[in-house]
Amino acid sequence: MEFYDKKTLFSFMDEERLEFPQSPTRDHHHRHHIHHNHHNLSIKTHKDLCEQDLQFSPPRPSSNSPHHSPGPVFTLLPPPSPESPWTLSPLQTPSPSILYHCIASLHRHEGNIYSIAVSKGLVFSGSESNRVRAWRQPDCIERGHIKASCGEVRAILAHGNMLFTTHKDCKVRVWNFTVSDSFRTKKVATLPRRSSFLMFSKSNSQQKQHRDCVSCMAYYHAEGLLYTGSYDKTVKAWRVLDKKCVDSFLAHESNVNAIVVNQDDGCVFTCSSDGSVKIWRRVYRENSHTLTMTLKFQQSPVNALALSTVFNNCFLYSGSSDGTINFWEKEKMSGRFNHGGFLQGHRFAVLCLVAIEKLIFSGSEDTTIRVWRREEGSCFHECLAVLDGHRGPVRCLAACLEMEKVVMGFLVYSASLDQTFKAWRIKVMPEEKICLDFTDRMSADSKTMTATSTAKTMDYEMSPVLSPSWVEKKIKNNYFQ
């Protein structure tokens, strides 16, 4: 699966090196995050923070609402020192919207991390090795691991004390874990079950396992159904209680890359390398599923999905290989999803998405993580910050709510193909209500073009370059599959 023209990527990188060379200070800042020790794993935490180190990032509008001006550029705050754990956005305003901080940075030698899940105060990571590691939130101290003999772990899903993992043998394992003084796990099921009758009976042909990599999972809590999507183009529904596959259907013309479930009505959303997003619904009183709607707006592969349901508002987001994030809003009366626009800012493929509350986190092949916020009561989105601590494509993300007061606090975990795993603490200030009359709105429209071009120029100047080691691997292999 190819996400972009290789020549375009490397020619862009060559131009970037000539036009925007990386400063020694910035290079030192990136190297400062990577350490090694005898455990082949290192961790760095930041605890001693001074007030002069606190830096803020202002909101940036998305391309679907050109009338919203980002405002003037201020330089009231001093630039951060190379040792500062706080990152300063290219644009600064005296009214900050977000404060973010990398609280832990780990480097590993066991291969790339493919998936992350969060539950019960733990963070789980699955990688090219045959181990699923459990880390304590938020400081990422290792609590234990699960060792399986079935190869790399492609996808992880956690719900309560249940953990679902997919492996190289195209099967799914179900684990129960406990969190107390020690981390303990017990395998409770393998899907499909190891049964000669089940595997070879013609009447149970749909019970067979996936024929290719199981790339994604989603769990419908109300019915206890686990959905799995695969590179074999199919989606299977498993009833966890009795470990049976209750439905299997051909979903797409190419790899199924992501799957999500609406917990309110049980609708299933899938996306694929064929460029489409599809909506499936269970047939009433049956286990079969029927296609209700196909959303297709671009030719490039769709790699990630996220569903946001807040205050009876439902939004679906999809990340594509062209760097855009499309979104659809669900009509409350008809239940139909209408295309609301797209979020533009990433320069290469969007590989992962997470939606929590009114925030959307997107990880990209351009090495950055963008934080977007949806304005209440509208389709307008603003980019609050660009997290650029990684030096390779951001492969997977997970997020959870840490506090819910006047200032919203979030914990975000990211893994990159530069073989680093990072934990971020993010604090989001309450959004300011901006009321513009018609005259003010027209005035803002006239300034949009100049302000947008300025923001883009600053973005390019501050964006990190891909690490040479990852570029060399990219030339030899495709690391997204």
Image: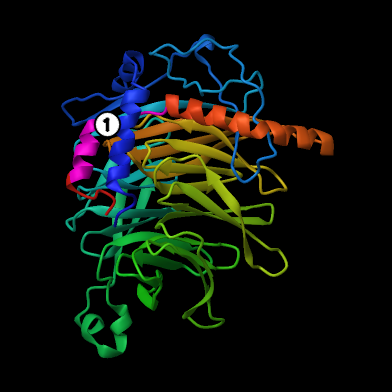
Please report the bounds of the magenta region as a residue range. Answer: 463-475
The residue shown at (56%, 27%) is 454
Residue 174 placement, left or right of 276: left
Image location (x, y in percent) of residue 474: 23, 43
* Image: 195 above or below 312: below
Give 419 or 206, whichever is nearer the viewer.
419
Image location (x, y in percent) of residue 343: 55, 45
Give the quadrant of residue 366.
top left
Give 288 or 27, whichever is nearer the viewer.
27
Image location (x, y in percent) of residue 266: 55, 68
Give 160 or 130, whichever is nearer the viewer.
130
Residue 47 seen: yes
* Image: 342 above or below 406: below
Say what secondary structure mark 1 lies in: loop
* Image: 317 above or below 60: below
Give the quadrant of residue 304.
bottom left
Residue 59 seen: no
The residue carrying pointer 1 sits among few (fewer than 14), some (14 to 19) or many (20 or more) residues within 10 Å by Cα, namely some
Main SS category, magenta section: helix
Q: Quadrant of the N terminus?
A: bottom left
Image location (x, y in percent) of residue 22: 34, 20
Q: Furthest-bottom residue in view?
A: 203
Q: Which residue is mark 1?
A: 467
